[in-house]
Image (tube, helix red, strand yellow):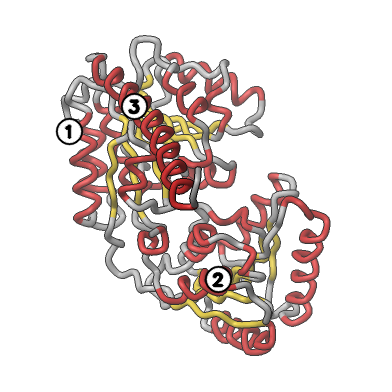
Amino acid sequence: PQSPELLRQAQYRLKFDELLGIQLNVQSRRTERLAKNNGFLFMKVGGVFNTFYNEKLPFPLTGAQKRVIREIRQDTVTGYQMNRLLQGDVGSGKTLVALMSMLLAVDNGFQACLMAPTEILASQHYASIVRMTEGIGLRVGLLTGSTKKKERAELSEGLLSGEIDILIGTHALIENGVRFRNLGFVVIDEQHRFGVEQRARLWSKNPQAAPHVLVMTATPIPRTLAMTLYGDLDVSVIDELPPGRRPIKTVHYTDAARLRLFGFMKQEIAKGRQVYVVYPLIKESEAMDYKDLTDGYEAISRDFPLPDYVTTICHGKMKPADKEESMRQFKSGEADIMVATSVIEVGVDVPNATVMVIESAERFGLSQLHQLRGRVGRGGEQSYCILMSGEKLSKESRARLDAMCETNDGFRLAE
């Protein structure tokens, strides 16, 4: 190119070519999918769905949830395979929508499965779904990497005989040994954690035809971008929070305010609330950051001594059983403070926790900060997110932390 302007035009042209190629590819896949008129039909809304809807709903559905369930129902009576992306901000009730969609499948004689990225999250989905569907004759199974051989064999048998209606699990679901009798509906949670190939392997679990697929994400993506990235998916959005949720107050403190922070934590604990303290764990220097977490844990244990305060710890290097135990202590309210790494960013649900302290907040990306903040504010109490950082911040980091303090709206943050 003879000039910067011509260079810009040339680059633009190349980018256009590349995008056009991607989009044509995506569209041809979509056309191919819609040409196969062999999607499973969920013609009836039956006993399981109705019993759940009339007797088991924990709270009335929001307008947005009803709209999305309607969209899913319409997709499942067309004769084509559904392929839908469900976007909803943290805490907007996506899991409930997913569960009700799976119940539709069960009513129509199909099995359903839900795949989550971590064991913690899969176990949580399992526990809450079993709790919510108690007494309606639904059989739910859980399969993760740490499921024992004997249990696996029992699960296998139950899946093939059709005994098990809904299977919840991690990547373990896509292993070859996992076979269903009649899989008709697949839910994939935190969709960005799974590759396209992994999703495709779940589709092939039913030899007759591909099951309907619902992928969920709490990382909001502007709609225009979502259509570009996931052009083969139809997009549904839950843009209302359940009633009674209060906006979370977010503030940014530097290390100088640590005493103030500890004082505030003590006040909230005195009211019977619980607190998360999250440390970054960066892959490149795990040795160093890992120590940060341990140091932090020691400092907090000093300032919040037993027996008045119970502090528990949770990170990716722990044995699953120890992690479970820490989670259990915190969920049951035995522990006041949970010191953790970002393992807890998805799906941990403790309504009594009202304070989220994020240490070295400048080291986290926006979507991670937003995810972490979504761990509090799940009960009716006023909740707080406190972003701690050093004094020296780059312009980008400051802009990120400011954005977090300004808005709770994941879609605005995504823009």
Query: Disc 1 versus disc 3: distance between alpha carbons?
Result: 26 Å
At label 3, counting other C-alpha atoms closer than 10 Å, the crowd grade (few under 14, some 14-19, many 20 or more) is few
The disc placed on residue 24 is: 3
Depth check: give the residue in front, 269 or 370. 370
Label 3 near label 1: C-beta < 8 Å?
no
Q: Secondary structure at mark 2?
A: strand
Q: Is residue 300 left or right of residue 36?
A: right
Residue 170: percent from the left, percent from the top?
55, 35
At label 1, counting other C-alpha atoms closer than 10 Å, the crowd grade (few under 14, some 14-19, many 20 or more) is few
* Residue at point 45%, 48% (across, down): 8
Foreground mark, 1 or 3? 3
Residue 16: percent from the left, percent from the top?
39, 38
Q: For mark 2, what is the residue?
A: 356
Q: For mark 1, what is the residue?
A: 74
Query: Disc 3 versus disc 2: distance between alpha carbons?
Result: 44 Å
Residue 135: percent from the left, percent from the top?
34, 40
Q: Secondary structure at mark 3?
A: helix
* Residue at point 75%, 71% (across, down): 296
Foreground mark, 3 or 2? 3
Rendered view: 130 above or below 396 = above
At label 2, counting other C-alpha atoms closer than 10 Å, the crowd grade (few under 14, some 14-19, many 20 or more) is many
Quadrant in which the C terminus is drawn: bottom left
Mark positioned earlier in the residue sequence (3 or 2): 3
Residue 382: percent from the left, percent from the top?
42, 78
The reply to whether residue 77 is in sight is: yes
Q: Residue furthest front?
A: 2
Depth check: give the residue in front, 163 or 32. 32
